[in-house]
Amino acid sequence: MSIDILTKYFQNLSETQIAQYAALGELYTDWNAKINVISRKDIGNLYEHHVLHSLGIARAIRFKPGTQVMDLGTGGGFPGIPLAILFPDTHFHLVDSIGKKILVATEVASSIGLKNVTLSHTRAEEIKDQYDFVVSRAVMPLPDMIKLVRRNITTIQRNALPNGLLCLKGGELGHELATFRHKALEWNLSDYFEEEYFKTKKVVFVAV
């Protein structure tokens, strides 16, 4: 388990960012032994399957300073924590309904000194604040997620990409995207990352 896979694709990381990413390996291994936030069989693939996968969103957008992002269903902190390291001038609010997962994400973020992350143990329906983007490693169909977060997206535009939902998804998404037509974009992560794992992985954007 090595951060070399990150520096292979993100070559302009600062020393601070490299140190923060490097610390994730031991932190998640230790926490995962106590609270299972990553499959025990998969913890050895942390950097490829979880950290680099999270950073796939950076292939769709470079968040401008001051951007506000909510990570919905963050689990142990994905994609929010890897993105918060990469974009230190963007604020990330990590939300999950499972308290022990938020505990892990909180401890990891604190241990590596992230100042641009806040966390909530709550359900999406309880979040009243507004954000430029909602990000997620989507576990529900896009139409359902759009209904859930529509009211959390601000109308004030800061970025080149319109405000909306950015999801990490896999497989054939035609049926999910058909509803949105001109409002949706997708990026195949296999165009950016050569590892076999990314062959069917995508970043999907829906303007809200």
Image (cartoon, helix red, strand yellow):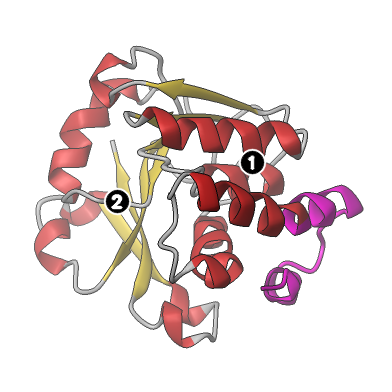
In screen coordinates, is 13 left or right of 91? right
- Residues 45 and 180: in front is 45
The residue at which mark 1 appears reads as: 84
Q: Which residues are magenta?
A: 1-22
Q: Amino acid at mark 2?
A: Ala
User: Quarter-wise, where is residue 85 in the image?
Assistant: top right
User: Quarter-wise, where is residue 185 in the image?
Assistant: bottom left
At 56% across and 65% down in the image, what residue appears? 46
Q: Which mark is residue 35?
A: none
Question: In the rendering, at what x and y percent does residue 64 appear?
Answer: 64, 38
View extreme (right): residue: 15
Q: Amino acid at mark 1?
A: Ala
C-alpha separation, residue under disc 1 versus residue under disc 2: 18 Å
User: Would you say the magenta stretch is mainly helix, strand or loop?
Assistant: helix
At 58% across and 30% down in the image, what residue appears? 106
Quadrant location, the N terminus: bottom right
Question: In the rendering, at what x and y percent does residue 183 appear?
Answer: 25, 49
The residue at which mark 2 appears reads as: 138
User: Quarter-wise, where is residue 73 in the image?
Assistant: top left
Question: In the rendering, at what x and y percent does residue 140 appear?
Answer: 19, 48
Quadrant location, the C terminus: top left
Say above or below: 4 vs 37. Answer: below
At 47% across and 45% down in the image, what residue appears? 161
In screen coordinates, is 40 left or right of 27? left
Say above or below: 198 vs 56. Answer: below
Work out whether mark 1 precedes mark 2 in sequence or the reverse, and give the earlier one. 1
Question: In the rendering, at what x and y percent does residue 92 appear?
Answer: 56, 31
View extreme (front): residue: 34
For label 1, count other residues whose C-alpha is less than 10 Å away and answer few (under 14), some (14-19) or many (20+).
Answer: many
In magenta stretch: residue 51 = no
